[in-house]
Amino acid sequence: MHMATVERKSSPEHEETSNRMFRSKEAMPMDTEVYESPYADPDELRSSTVDRNQLFLEDGELGSGNFGTVMKGIYKMRKTEKPVAVKILKNDDNNPSVREEMLREANVMQQLDNPYIVRMIGICEAENLMLVMELAELGPLNKFLQKNKNTSVKNITELVHQVSMGMKYLEEHNFVHRDLAARNVLLVTQHYAKISDFGLSKAVAEEQNYYKAKGHGKWPVKWYAPECINYFKFSSKSDVWSFGVLMWEAFSFGQKPYKGMKGNDVMQMLESGKRMEPPVNCPTEMYDLMTTCWTYKVEERPGFAVVEPRLREYYYDIAQ
Ligand code: AMP
């Protein structure tokens, strides 16, 4: 009897079921391969470098940016084979700063380990510099929602709550993201979101708790709090402001915030005390939370330690 059970568990049929569960759009966070770090298994050696011979790139791009492309691949570890996303730096000798940027991003990601943040598996220095990451195959949240307009309010709340959990972790570890937006939230499944793109992220000193930028860069102004634009000051509180914009994007199914407006007009609108209107059919509780994230004064704006439980409670209420 016992033997029979063991046999059934290891049968191809069972494997097929569990594979489907891992890859299904409906799988919950804990049922996926990317909930725990690949290095959580003590048999897998923790290393910040990936051996090129163990990395197999597949055809087809997952995405691209000014650094190069992101491809899907398989990383053969000691015990398992991991589907991965590989950010490949294009060979551009004229631009060493892009390489530095990618190494900085890798350095930040390496210090983070949370189920709601895309983990870095390692750096691979081969024909190109490559950043090997956990795969979030369903791609950016804004694009997913643009294509899936039947996604329920409950499902959207679940996803933004997961983002708030990842951000609470960043806040606790004194990192500021500085580019939190729906385009930088990637989906593993329809019910599992992870924060990505740490290209602008910074570790901040605990005593000071903000990062002071030296000058105005290529900034996502529509996601930035007033103190970022006016004083170049970035903190977890300014990430909270961006999170409010991300919530607005999510509940409006991936629409662009402040559509058709220039950065300066947005600043003037915010200075005069106006804020974006609620998205169509957005629950009042969720719009209230967005406007709280858009509190003008940093000192009065809540942190993720307050925002996350508010989302959790609302999600539990409607999930019943
Ligand atoms: P990035 O420059 O990091 O925003 O990456 C550009 C695009 O590549 C993203 O918008 C995604 O479509 C894709 N991408 C990046 N990282 C991943 C990942 N870990 N899993 C799946 N797709 C990814």
Image (cartoon, rainbow, N blue to C red):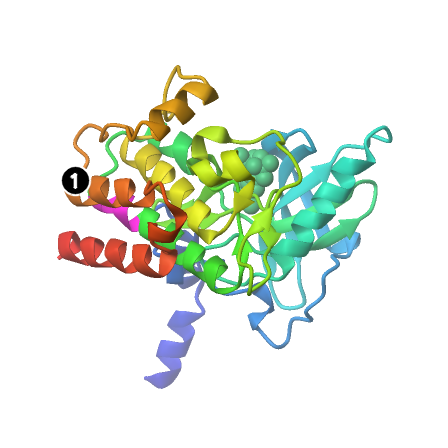
Residue farthest along the right direction in this orientation:
93
Chain part drawn in magenta: 154-158
Residue denoted by label 1 = 283
Residue 207 location (% of width, % of height):
55, 65
Percent position (x, y) of residue 297?
37, 45
**Quarter of the image where one finds residue 108:** bottom right
Q: Does residue 183 lie above or below 258 as drawn?
A: below
Give the camera-side residue of 309 and 129.
309
Three-letter amino acid code of the residue under disc 1:
Pro
- Side of 179 where 281 appears, left or right: left
User: How dense is the environment of label 1, judged by Cα within 10 Å: few (below 14), some, or many (20 and up)?
Assistant: few
At 60% from the left and 68% from the top, the residue drawn is: 39
- Residue 17 against residue 193 in the figure, above or below: below
Up/down of 9 relative to 228, above or below: below
Among the 4 quarters of the image, the one containing residue 90: top right
The quadrant the N terminus occupies is: bottom left
